Amino acid sequence: MDFTHIHVEQMESVAILTLDHPPANALSQPTFSGLTEALDYVEKEASVKVIILKGNGKFFAAGADIKEFTTVSSAAESVQMAKIGQQVFARMEAFSKPIIAAIHGAALGGGLELAMACHIRFATPTAKLGLPELNLGLIPGFAGTQRLPKLIGKAKALELLFTSLPISGEEAQRLGLVNQCFAEEELFDKVLAFAQAVASKSAISLSYLLEAIRVGEEEGMAAGSEKEAELFGHIFETYDAKEGIQAFIEKRKPIFKDK
């Protein structure tokens, strides 16, 4: 299934969203529209439990579409452009199904902001990740100034932003920006295996887990703990919780039905 610059395919319970905007998978306003439609589709598709986001060709996403910037004639237009990207990425971060980024080649500028909006990230050791907007006399516009310090700390984030220099996937793993690195020829297979392992869990418990974490991040630990307790109570009423507990007692693998 194809949307603007986004190809969607499904392998059992895992949906693969491939950014396909040659030559560099630059993020344009049409790309954001296509990504929104793809998210609409995987959100409604009950059989999809986990999403992988990757890039086609040589790059994950080399940045925002700079040519679009030349069409902007006012601050109001620039604000609107930034807000569209921010809204899409905020939706991804708050998505009820896990989204996993598989990064190869380059994830720069808007491309790194896209990756940071995913729940977790895997990369190749030689991938290039960075926010080089200062080189253009700009600043990140898709909440990169907010997510990068949260992920790697303020001091290191400022270093990367000030210098505008990219770091390798290996360095990004050391900083905690990506979870693990895999050789390029095995990146997708490793990420797919991870996604399939996650998809073996109950869709309800996955969504509750993400919701509890989101509330804690947005509203603080007290609110997050309150939400966790509320969801912990609700989940005991589900079939999957009963099945999981019974399977543990019977020393067998649970058969979840996502209900």
Image (cartoon, helix red, strand yellow):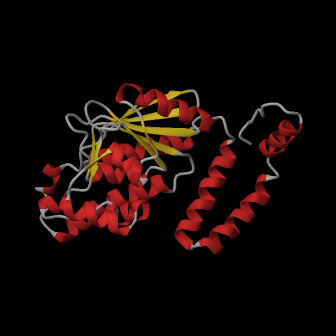
Direction from residue 75 to residue 179 in the image, left or right: right
For residue 88, say whether it is visible.
Answer: yes
Task: Tell me the quarter of the image containing the C terminus.
Answer: top right
Q: Position of residue 213 (x, y in %)?
A: 59, 60
Q: How many marks?
A: 0
Q: Residue at x 55, y 39 (%)?
A: 50
Relative to 57, say whether 116 is above or below: below
Q: Residue at x 68, y 68 (%)?
A: 225
| Residue 165 location, quadrant | bottom left
Relative to 251, say whether 97 is above or below: below
Q: Position of residue 232 (x, y in %)?
A: 75, 58
Q: Position of residue 182 (x, y in %)?
A: 41, 34
Task: Tell me the quarter of the image containing the N terminus.
Answer: top left
Relative to 182, say whether 157 is above or below: below
| Residue 211 location, quadrant | bottom right
Q: Residue at x 38, y 65 (%)?
A: 149
Direction from residue 147 to residue 60 in the image, left or right: left
Relative to 230, say whether 88 is above or below: above
Direction from residue 29 to residue 196 in the image, left or right: right
Direction from residue 209 to residue 14 in the image, left or right: left
For residue 140, say whether it is visible.
Answer: no
Q: Position of residue 106 (x, y in %)?
A: 26, 42
Q: Residue at x 27, y 64 (%)?
A: 159
